[in-house]
Amino acid sequence: METQTLATPPRSADALAPSETSFEPRESDISYYGWRVVLAACLGVMAGFGSLFVYTFSVFVKPLAAQFGWGREAISTGFAIAAVTLGFISPFLGRWIDRYGPRRIILVCMSVFGCAIASLSLLRFGLWQFYLTCFVAGIVGNGAAHLAYSRSISTWFQRRLGVALAVVMVGAGLGAMILPVVAQAVLSRAGWRTAYASLGGLALLLGLPLSWRYIRERAVVRQKSAPLVHSGKTWQQGLRSFAFWIITIILFLSSISMNGAITHLSALLTDRGISAGRAALCASILGGSSVLSRIVAGWSLDRFFGPHVAFLTNIITALGIFFLARVSSFPLGCFAATLIGIGAGGEAAITPYLLTRYFGLRAFSTLYGLTWTFYAAAGAIGPVILGQAFDATGSYASLLILLAAALGLVAAMNLLLPKYPDLSADMV
């Protein structure tokens, strides 16, 4: 009877602490409540900003241009507004998550995000309405993405944290594979307005109820009326840490390289004589390999020293970008896309894992939000500089080789990261 009671979801954010019972299922047990949190987070991420907004955006470019006469550059500016806003607001959002807990922030952000996407079906009044909606989506975006969910997951897992985070990140990969197809199918049958309304409804009907039902933090210290207490560094201590800036610098350069390569992948391959259909297949292979690599990276993080896993992942990414610069055939294009996908998927699981190990949970979301600011800025820079390189030289090759070499060198900084510190003495 006691085991059944403990397997049910906690009634409040203050879940039972591990020390309160000896009958609680272990992390490796399927009945462990943390795995329900993981599954809810995985589906929440799939219905959140990173998947639903980002990967379906291109589906609506032509329909919006045809409906309103907007240029593609004007429509793409909406995406840029959302991305820049998300990068700017992420540290503040992370701070609120650390202060108030992930569940409250997720519920508010997912509600606003779903309504914002659905409201795009009512576009009537010109670009300013479109831009305003993108701006709102950017404000709440990381509250409806793995930035918020990772905090909750990290309170439930120690020995299986890598796998747990990887499963959550699989949601983003599944969204990248499924949602564009779903959006296009609805758009073809019922129009772009119905497609936007359907996507907004998906966020509200999938992400919101699951988050409300299952997303909880697990208490580390539980007293009668005290708030959750977590060990770890403050965000100020994190910013003064050599380890934080190593993680951030590597992430920044990796984001420039990966986002630039992914954005121009199809154009580069078709420039080399590969058909548009085969180029699309390479993009699909990239998405599939990123999903698998999330699981492999999570499994590896639980068994090997995290910086060593990160080093190998960054080297694989650098090799993928190098081979992409030298692509001359479809098989080589598939190989390059596979390596880049492995890097993209692995990086998504590695960053939050390393932050928990070096800085604990005390200011985890704040520090994770700060890394997102750098990631978003780099993600905006990469496609632009590759586009400029092509316009100037007629080729992507030279800059891609330079980015691959730089990433390979910076990857070695992972080997400078120290052993994980003992954070048990650093309490709120």
Image (cartoon, rainbow, N blue to C red):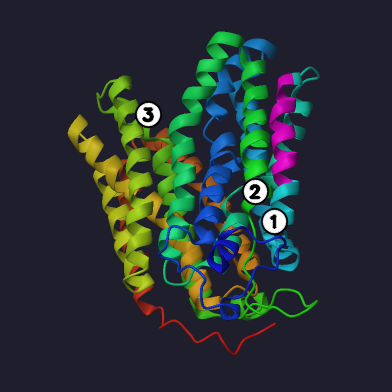
Amino acid at dot 3: Ala
**Vertical side of 37 occupied by 340: above or below:** above
Residue at the disc numbered 2 = 211
Answer with mark 2 or mark 3, whichever residue precedes in sequence.
2
Q: Is residue 314 visible?
A: no
Magenta stretch bounds: 109-121
Q: CA distance from mark 3 to mark 1?
A: 41 Å
x 55%, y 84%: residue: 423
Residue nearest the observer in this picture, 420 or 2 = 2
Q: Quadrant of residue 224?
A: bottom right
Residue at the disc numbered 3 = 267
Q: Nearer the viewer, mark 3 or mark 1?
A: 1
In the image, farthest residue toward the bottom: 425
Q: Residues within 10 Å of mark 2 (few under 14, many from 20)?
A: many
Q: Do the residues under discs 1 and 2 have CB atoms within 8 angstroms?
A: yes
x 61%, y 75%: residue: 17
Residue at the disc numbered 1 = 103
Q: Secondary structure at mark 1?
A: helix
Magenta segment: does it hold 110? yes
**Vertical side of 270 occupied by 287: above or below:** below
x 72%, y 62%: residue: 12
131 vs 53, left or right, is right
Q: Position of residue 238 (x, y in %)?
A: 60, 77
Q: Secondary structure at mark 3?
A: helix
Amino acid at dot 2: Ser
Magenta segment: does it hold 69? no
396 vs 98, left or right, is left
